[in-house]
Amino acid sequence: MPDPSFDTVMLQDLLPRLRAGDPAARNEVIRAAQARLEELTRRMLRKFPAVARWTDADDVFSGAAMRLLRALESTPVADTRAFLNLSAAVIRRELIDLARHYQGPHGVGANHDSVARPDGVVPDPSDRSPGEADLARWSALHEAVLQLPVEEREAFMLTFYHGWTQALIAELFQVDERTIRRRWRAAATRLSDVLGGELPDLGDE
């Protein structure tokens, strides 16, 4: 079955209350999926090296959770699939804003060579955070994902951000695994075209 921590009975029961406008349901939805959202934040943070140098997943999740609460006030969430998409989009937006904060012209990453991480460790000078060109490339990738056709975007997000296998995604969407593989490849090709061939390493997904 696809990721059980997103597909619990509790979460399924909460979604109708959420659609009905029950304000208490927003907090309960996040609590019901908190463990999976925290894991998603950790995975996504690794895709944002300009942010990971300066902050940790707990702080990112705190900011993203507040954004998600606000988003749930106005965004219809029909099912688990919609919740997955919304969660990834909100966490990505938090990370993009943090990347701009840390690596922008006035950010700490652009103006300091060696600043201690939240764990107190001072980075080695040879282990510098990505420069502005690398930040721009990653930021452009995350922004371009939003412009993908829906089916390609979902396949890309669940693979790249959530870390799902293509078999699990195929089961969720009730399609053949080859269809998901085709959507992933189409998404990667489209993103490469949008970025002028400057596509960051997407790993082995």
Image: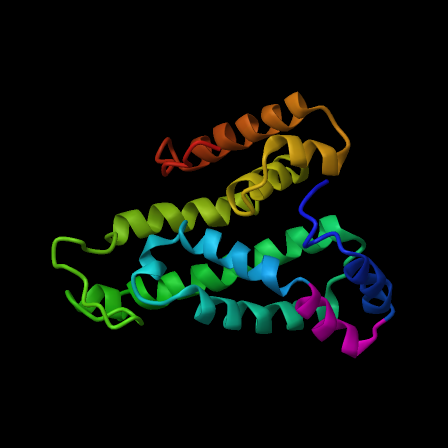
> Farthest residue toward the left?
125
* Nearer to us in this view, 73 or 164: 164
* Nearer to us in this view, 106 or 29: 29
Magenta stretch? 21-32
* Nearer to us in this view, 149 or 92: 92
Q: Quadrant of residue 17?
A: bottom right
| Residue that appears at 44% across and 31% down | 204
| Residue that appears at 49% across and 49% down | 143
Q: Quadrant of residue 166?
A: top right
Residue 151, above or below 181:
below
Find out whether residue 113 is within the magenta segment.
Answer: no
Find out whether residue 30 is within the magenta segment.
Answer: yes
Residue 170: give x, y in percent of width and height: 69, 31
The answer to whether residue 85 is left or right of residue 141 is right
Residue 78, above or below 55:
above
Residue 186, above or below 57:
above
The answer to whether residue 122 is left or right of residue 158 is left
Residue 75: give x, y in percent of width and height: 73, 63
| Residue that appears at 41% across and 35% down | 203
Q: Main secondary structure of the magenta part?
A: helix
Residue 10: give x, y in percent of width and height: 79, 62
The answer to whether residue 109 is left or right of residue 30 is left
Residue 160: give x, y in percent of width and height: 51, 41
